[in-house]
Amino acid sequence: MLKIPQLLATELSLKPFQVENALELFAEGATVPFIARYRKERTGEMDEVQLRDLLDRHTYLTELEDRKTAILKSIADQGKLTAELQQTITDCLQK
């Protein structure tokens, strides 16, 4: 499946440490304004706009991965999953 942090770093032109640290802070329950004001040293000076874009895209990609997993399981349970279909679904980046 997707390596979401690496994809986010590429898509949003961020350094991998910025993405990883920001995602850790979000996982701990920190909010966008809190991180932008008080955790700049951990995120490499990311502003609120960058943090919001990161959070929104991370949420989207995480939900997409969950959905792809469910779809692949459903198709496999029906016995209709081919390698080509699996690859097409796995490579998809949009709902």
Image (spheres, helix red, strand yellow):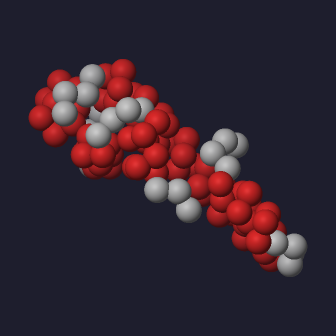
Q: Is residue 26 above or below residue 81?
A: above
Could you tell me which residue is drawn at 46 percent across and 51 percent down? 4
* Quarter of the figure with the N terminus: bottom right
**Residue 74 visible at all:** no
* Quarter of the figure with the C terminus: top right
Q: How many marks?
A: 0
**Residue 50 visible at all:** yes
The residue lying toward the viewer, choosing from 30 and 67, is: 67
Left or right: residue 67 compared with residue 33: right
Left or right: residue 88 compared with residue 22: right
Could you tell me which residue is drawn at 50 percent across and 42 percent down? 59
Could you tell me which residue is drawn at 31 percent across and 22 percent down? 48
- In terms of image quadrants, where is residue 60? top right
- In terms of image quadrants, where is residue 51? top left
- In terms of image quadrants, where is residue 37? top left
* Residue 41 point in image, percent of width and height: 12, 35
* Residue 31 point in image, percent of width and height: 30, 33
Q: Is residue 76 above or below residue 33?
A: below
The residue lying toward the viewer, choosing from 31 and 67, is: 67
* Residue 61 point in image, percent of width and height: 54, 46
The residue lying toward the viewer, choosing from 78 and 93, is: 93
Q: Is residue 69 above or below residue 17?
A: below
* Residue 17 point in image, percent of width and height: 25, 46
The residue lying toward the viewer, choosing from 89 and 62, is: 89
